[in-house]
Image: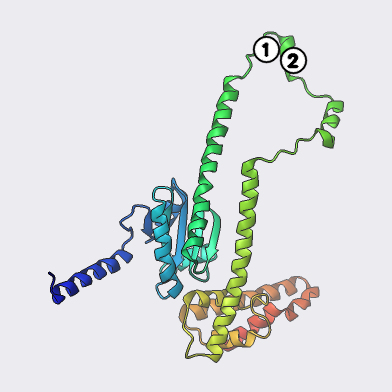
Amino acid sequence: MFSAVSRGAQVTRIVGQGRRLLHTSTSRLSNIYKIQTIEEFTEKVSNSKTPVIVDFFATWCGPCKMLTPRIESIIQENEGKISLLKVDVDEHSDLALDHEVSSVPVLVAFNKGKEENRIIGLQDTDKLRKWVGDFVKNEKPRKRKAEKDRGKKEEREKNLPDEPQSDEEGASETREPTEEEIQESKKPENQLNVETVRGKKRKLTQKNVEQSKEKLKNLEKESAVTYLKKWKNEKNRWKFEKLKQIFIQNNALNEDKFDEEMWPIVLEYLEKSKGASRKFLIDTAEKVIQEVDQAIEEDSQKTALLKESRYLRARELLQILH
């Protein structure tokens, strides 16, 4: 029988092993990785023989800590069919920006290096399992279609007719169509409206991607506005978030992201910027002002640019930062 001390030591060892596992680049399963470099990310997303799901997370994010073990468990259920890459957005903010991730957690599904779908926020296990299952299921039709296309191509090449036996026969096979035949072929009833299964899937995928991006943009905006209002009115509950900081810096002059009601708060927030962030804001504001000044210098009738929100905000921002 174990003593209380030995049981405690055993639990400590188990917990310690679990913690160490979270910080390794590869888990015990060969298809789950924690990304260490951008080059590694590019290699594993572009050259993977199986579909890939990327888990964008942050160590300070509560929902991430709940989502990650769920998606890992589902990936294990599909071992060999799909891989999981885990990206810490604080360590790899460039990857997060490249893939338009400004809030976490986000799961992004890739196939042959191209994004096919994404899911945002904490999800229950059943919904995750269906999402992953649908993504994996679609891989089989992709492969079957590719194999079928290859088979058809080989069959066509195999059954190509022999070379014409005479000049006269060859001429009849390769003659140019007459003008009458060309016009006849252009009639609607003679046009084939053929859309392949792959083409339909591509359109559907593109539509889903665009919808996801639009939804993400709205979510980014709403999240940033909430973040700023909390900073302004509830500082005891406010916590600094690097991705929100980047989003605000990049979109401060954009009236579509921050309306006139939010602009004073944005300005007050950015006034406290230091170091590289402050330099970035100054450079951005100066660039906007220079572009407008140059446009007016080239065409004096463009003075209306001086009244545009972007220009006015740039001047105001530059004034408080200098």
Say whether residue 251 is visible: no
Q: Determine the image quadrant of residue 265.
A: bottom right
Q: Residues within 10 Å of mark 1 (few under 14, many from 20)?
A: few
How far separated are the C-alphas under marks 1 and 2? 9 Å
Q: What kind of element bears circle 2?
A: helix
Which of the image's four quarters has the C terminus?
A: bottom right
Q: Position of residue 78 (x, y in %)?
A: 42, 51
- Sequence-wise first label, 1 or 2: 1
Say whether residue 192 is visible: yes
Residue 76 falls left or right of residue 4 = right
Which of the image's four quarters has the N terminus?
A: bottom left
Q: Is residue 168 above or below residue 74?
A: above
Q: Residue at x 52, y 52 (%)?
A: 135
For label 1, the residue is 164
Residue 98 falls left or right of residue 33 = right
Do callouts 1 and 2 mark residues in contact (Cβ within 8 Å)? no
Amino acid at circle 1: Pro
The residue nearer to you, when weighing 101 against 82, is: 82
Q: Position of residue 171 (x, y in %)?
A: 74, 15
Q: Is residue 1 above or below residue 118?
A: below
Q: Position of residue 254 (x, y in %)?
A: 65, 75
Q: Residues within 10 Å of mark 2 (few under 14, many from 20)?
A: few
For label 2, the residue is 171
The residue nearer to you, when weighing 36 against 215, is: 215
Q: Is residue 179 above or below residue 195?
A: above
Q: Determine the image quadrant of residue 5.
A: bottom left
The residue nearer to you, when weighing 20 against 169, is: 20
Q: Residue at x 37, y 53 (%)?
A: 31
Amino acid at circle 2: Ala
Q: Residue at x 51, y 69 (%)?
A: 121
Residue extending furthest toward the right: 180
Residue extending furthest toward the front: 1
